[in-house]
Amino acid sequence: MKLTFHGAVRTVTGSQHLLEVNGTRILLECGLFQGKRREAFERNQQLPYDPRQVDMMILSHAHIDHSGNIPSLVKNGFRGDVLCTFATRDLCAAMLRDSAHIQKHDVEYVNKKRARAGRPLVEPLYTIEDAVQSLKHFLAVGYERPYRISPDITATFYDAGHILGSAIVVLDIQENGAARRLVFSGDLGRPDRLILRDPTIVDGADVLLIESTYGSRLHEPVPEAERELERIIVQTYRRGGKVIVPSFAVGRTQELVYSLQRLKQRRDIPAQLPVFVDSPLAIDVTSIFRLHPECYDEEVGRFLVESGDPFGFEQLRYTRSVRESKEINFSREPAVIISASGMCEAGRILHHLKNNVEDPRNTVLIVGWQAPDTLGRRLVERKPVVKIFGEEYPLNAQVEVINGFSAHADRDELLDWVNGMKRRPEHTFVVHGEESASEAFSRLLRQQGWPGVHVPQLHESFAV
């Protein structure tokens, strides 16, 4: 068995891990690398393997840093299946088209500059047509339903509790007459989160690939995060300001909407305060959430029966058209505006930030991890001036950060998950984390006596 790590090692983006066993080549994930524009374009354009030689792809969940380069994979000759859960397939149908749309506009912006400089124009990584074509390769399987990839490899998905449809991938392999098990955590969620079930504990593994996004940090509990949300909204409302929330369209937006509904029902925030979800993708995704109650925890299941729609209430408006989006910025009344993208790198959130960061009455509320070199990270760092659409704006608005809504397990939650295994793996690969987080988590595992713990380098291979 050979593993090669082509992405999401010593960083959190561009997840791609190639498994070669018994003559079969299986790609775990095909995510977009997100970072500085030029580096990201080059890395995403140049796949470090021949897609025509990949037999199957397995996708743990729909986030773009895990799924976003599947259209390029297909465009460059991949002809196998993309195995995932039903909810992941439905989310990708919306998210990959949205990704293509964003790339089209990004390339138009870049080409204007290149044309003025007399430089050759560039093409987007893929088009909407490429994204739609890639969906023909998706093959959906339910949780805990073993699927035979080949006579000697069986894949089973278990609930990862990260986002809708997210899965822990278990591969049971017969190799050289012996049974071996590879477990890929994907991205692990947190126990006791809103909406989704807790991550499933897997009995054991021979080879483990474990994420480490928060491998060196702890989150505040979800109830404390909700109290912080209440405090920030009430204080901003009293100042007469708006709360601007850059939010990922998948998972985070739905959790925020559900939390706001709970706060309003308890009268903890003003009942008349309008809430806008201004993201066509988030609207599409919320509709997909309604289709998959098999992913909900018991609390949301009860809410559906007793109170109705967990993603809708009287003061909530989903705005799809550009006209509706612009109208929000003409309002001078307090409001909560939730918009994508979560790292403030594209989408309508940029317009809301442009119109609101200079006003000290307003609050920019960050509810997710922000990658280096993104506008979101600069907001978290409270830079005195931020650049939006190439123009500089003084950051006079308040900036607040709530980590309790994170969809990723923190250090102790990751440890609880791995220590829940009855049989420790011979080889553990710590992936999907900034270098400091991955190294810190690997040290913790070694201190606890785990053998064979590695933090791979980019494109490094291991025979296991």
Image: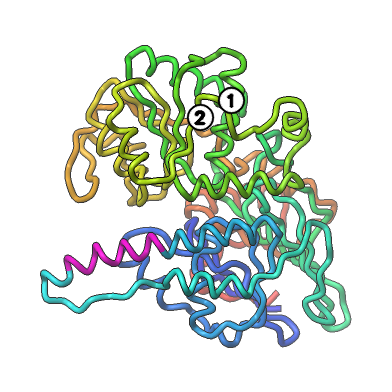
Q: State how far apart marks 2 and 1 are (Cα).
A: 9 Å
Q: For the residue carrying disc 1, how many other residues have a C-alpha within 10 Å: few (<14), some (14-19), or many (20+)? A: many
Dot label at residue 215: none
Q: Nearer the viewer, residue 448 or 74?
A: 74
Image: magenta residue range: 101-113
Residue 261, disc? 1
Of circles 2 and 1, the one toward us is 2
Residue 108 among those drawn in magenta: yes
Residue type at tag 2 = Leu
In which quarter of the view is residue 120 placed? bottom left
- Judge by depth and name the residue closer to the eye, 89 or 149: 89
Q: Quadrant of residue 424?
A: bottom right
Q: Position of residue 219 (x, y in %)?
A: 57, 33
* Residue 73 picture location, percent across and down: 52, 77
Above or below, 23 against 143 in this view is: below
- Disc 1 residue type? Gln
**Which residue corresponds to mark 2?**
316
Among numbered discs 2 and 1, the one appearing first in the sequence: 1
Give the SS element for disc 1: helix
Identified at 46% across, 59% down, the residue is 98
Residue drawn at the location 40% of the way across and 28% of the way down: 400
Q: For numbered disc 2, what is the local secondary structure?
A: strand
CB within 8 Å, label 2 to label 1 = yes
Residue 49 versus residue 321 in the image, above or below: below
Q: Is residue 402 magenta?
A: no
Q: On the rendered image, what quadrant is the N terminus found in?
A: bottom right
